[in-house]
Image: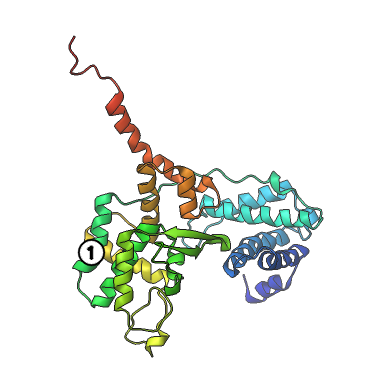
Amino acid sequence: MALKEKDDTLAKKSQIHELIRDFGDYLEIEKNRSKRTRENYAFYLGRFADWSLEKGISKAGAITLDSVRQFRLWLNRLEDHRGVPLKKNTQNYHLIALRAFLKYLSKRDIETLAAEKIELAKQPDRHVEFLEPKEVEKLLDAPMKAQGPDMVRLRDRTILELLWSTGLRVSELCSLKLGDINFNRNEFTVKGKGSKYRVVFFSEDAKAWLKKYQDARRDMSPMLFVSHDRASKGRDEMSGITPRTVQRIVEHYRKLAGITKSISPHTLRHSFATDLLMNGADLRSVQSLLGHASVTTTQIYTHITDSHLQEVYKAFHDKRKGKKS
């Protein structure tokens, strides 16, 4: 598209575009959603609004089930610069945002398509990668066997232990502050997705490593985990680590531990949930510990525990062998 044509397209603003902006304000002010959440909704809905405008649909009342069907077809055929089409779950993100937008319009008594008429695309079963107990042990032991500054190795060991002990999201881990930790109760409160708070518990092993790391710190940063970057201007200016840093840490020790499967910080979250279920925890409890809004999200782990079915089968089925005739 030529630069002038692109500028002309951007200059056009439909009623749908304006309502999407109002919807963003509503999410931020009345629903108390994060800036990132607002940006995500703006991206998905902005794509719908731009597509609608090209099709001559500029008002909310003109959104029909047929137009949404055409938009879904367009999404399904959309490819990136490498020729890779959008994943089904990404396509569904657009539809989830659109349904939320339509519900907002209905609340404002603006005539438009009913949100419940939009169904999400069926997705293939999600594959969840997790670590076996021996792999977890190798990963946790790797930092203290590695070469490098003692403080960095101690920090990394503590990070891995806390991820495994709590099932935290990497963003939640990076936002923790020293004052958040209650060592008397082995717990802390974390702000998760949707700005929802939950209590997180940690093990005695995690507690021991947290104390070792805390006692070794000499900086003045309030963050639980810091960069320990020698280039820092001052001890009180040391910044907290980023999710990308944690990803690199996990990848580094994966290689040192000789783990061949591809893993990430989220793999430890999967491993945490799997370990709980395999040891008899109920699904609702695991849902609460992970901070899932819906138990449906937690159900992705249930097929992992099917390995127990094989044990039951071997233990109880067909006991004729060894019996006297």
**Residue 160 position by quadrant:** bottom left
Visible residue check, residue 118: yes
Mark 1 — residue? 142
**Residue 51 position by quadrant:** bottom right
User: Between residues 244 and 3, which one lies in front from this camera angle?
Assistant: 244
User: Between residues 233 and 96, which one lies in front from this camera angle?
Assistant: 233
Image quarter (top left, top right, bottom left or bottom right) of the N terminus: bottom right
Amino acid on which disc 1 is placed? Ala
Q: Write the residue at 42% across / 80% down.
A: 239
Q: Write the residue at 46% across / 65% down.
A: 172
Visible residue check, residue 125: no
**Residue 107 appears at what percent x and percent y?**
77, 55
User: Between residues 93 and 140, which one lies in front from this camera angle?
Assistant: 140
User: Between residues 75 and 26, which one lies in front from this camera angle?
Assistant: 26
Q: In the displayed structure, does residue 56 sit left or right of residue 302?
A: right
Q: In the displayed structure, does residue 112 sit left or right of residue 226?
A: right
Q: In the displayed structure, does residue 169 sit left or right of residue 29?
A: left
